[in-house]
Amino acid sequence: MSSRAVLTSKAPQLRRCFSSTRGANADFTHAVSARRLPCPRCVARAVVQSPRIKTGSIDSTQVIGAGVVGLAVARQLAVHEGTSTILLERHDAPGTETSSRNSEVIHAGLYYPATSLKTSLCIRGRNMLYETCAKYGIPHRNTKKWIVAQTAAQWEACLRVHKHAQALGDAPTRLVGQDEARRREPDVKADAGIVESETTGIVDSHSLMTYLQGEFEDRDGDCAFKTRVTDIQRVPDGYQITAVSDEDGSETSITAETLINSAGHGACAINNLLLPPDRHRVPHYAKGTYFSYAAAALHLRPDMGGRIRFGPDIEWVDDPSDLQPSPARLEKALPEIKAYLPGVDLSAIALDYCGIRPKLGRGGAVNQGTGFQDFVIQEEEGFPGFVNLLGIESPGLTSSLAIGEMVDGILYR
Ligand SMILES: Cc1cc2nc3c(=O)[nH]c(=O)nc-3n(C[C@H](O)[C@H](O)[C@H](O)COP(=O)(O)OP(=O)(O)OC[C@H]3O[C@@H](n4cnc5c(N)ncnc54)[C@H](O)[C@@H]3O)c2cc1C
């Protein structure tokens, strides 16, 4: 059952209660701008419902975006006593954008430069994820992964990955011989060789997000869904955030000491609302299409939902809502799939779904690509308490728990 959490509207006569996710805690009064009086009815309820309310003494944090990363950050920050954390999300549920349109792979961290955030957060996040999934019964599996080569040039690239992984220390890989390969995966063609990543796996991302939301709320955090952030102003005691309700169009103003931008495809727009023009960011969108496989003849390992999938590929698009799969992508993918699975029934491969990677440029996401683009996770200079999370593409799902830990370290170091 949902409770009503208190936020004041910009215009005093429009003061209203916001829907929140829990009945137990609704102390949004600390987040109310000092210049506006909260609705007395709502304050009375908040005081009754929240024994920890201490007027004027609670530090408030707003996290924008309830994808897997925003959820992990909010859950981590909510652990601090004497603080209050609110997660603002424009949709009516968590994880409905990129976090539900990915491969659900727990990446090993093999592909990024050794000193990058992508490497350190992926390795740390992967270890935290396996531990958390095992502890709380979140469906996952350490499947391992094969990187296969058909040509000498591909094998050279595989060996570079293997060497890089050995140097990283906590991303074990090994070479798989032809006999072992034939025994374990007889359908896979790998003429030049195979490198196996031992720590790669898969996770049910929806179960993970349900767990993160539950823990966040157990720690007295509040989710405000259908709440779209439209403006942010710097004020003496923090940041004044204006949000519009996607339910009734009403506008709400909230002041918070700490603000985390975890808005995925909306993160550059949030950045640009607050930072000066010379620090504005331009978002780029790299669409990936998946292909489903409906025949059972091959011994392929299904995903957590029991389905077999290929992809994603990469295609630059101008619009983050361009999620329609295109038949042209399927035509292009078929020969590539056939190259390593010669026995595949091509007629059983169909277009499935798309996801779009939030990119900060058209450079590569991995070591081999030109113009490697790392995650940007930083408290912005001149904006104390404002932490930006930009370009959180893959391996963002794997890294989510470690990103939560890192943001916590930035704010509470
Ligand atoms: C094709 C593809 C495959 C991938 N595969 C993997 C993989 O196998 N393994 C892996 O580790 N990673 C993978 N990733 C990356 C991973 O999915 C993302 O890094 C991760 O989901 C990002 O989570 P997020 O919370 O940052 O963003 P999102 O899930 O996009 O969440 C951001 C949220 O912010 C909200 N929002 C935006 N603007 C506003 C606003 N103004 N007001 C309020 N709310 C707002 C949005 O509605 C959204 O819910 C893949 C990504 C793609 C696209």
Image: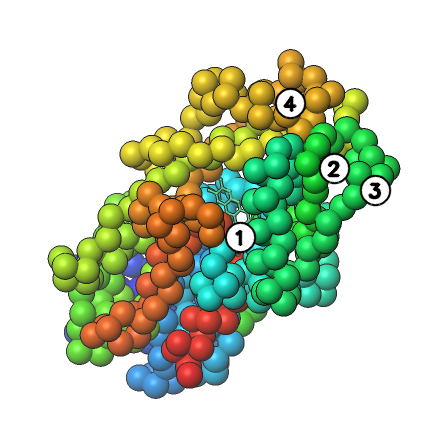
Q: What type is the residue that disc 1 sits on?
A: Tyr
For image coordinates 38% across by 47% down, the residue present is 370
Q: What type is the residue that disc 4 sits on?
A: Lys
Q: Name the residue under label 3.
A: 180
Q: How far apart are marks 4 and 1 (CA)?
A: 24 Å
Which label lies toward us, 4 or 3?
Answer: 3
| Precedes in sequence: disc 1 or disc 2 | 1
User: In the rendered view of the protein, which quadrant contains the N terminus?
Assistant: bottom right
| Precedes in sequence: disc 3 or disc 2 | 3
| Precedes in sequence: disc 4 or disc 3 | 3
Lateral position of residue 219 relative to residue 254, left or right = right
Q: What type is the residue that disc 3 sits on?
A: Glu
Checking the image for residue 338, the label placed there is 4
Q: In which quarter of the image is residue 298?
A: top right
For image coordinates 43% across by 26% down, the residue present is 324
**Residue 402, percent from left and from top:** 52, 66
Q: What type is the residue that disc 2 sits on?
A: Arg
Q: Name the residue under label 2.
A: 301
Q: Is residue 230 visible?
A: yes
For image coordinates 52% across by 35% down, the residue present is 312
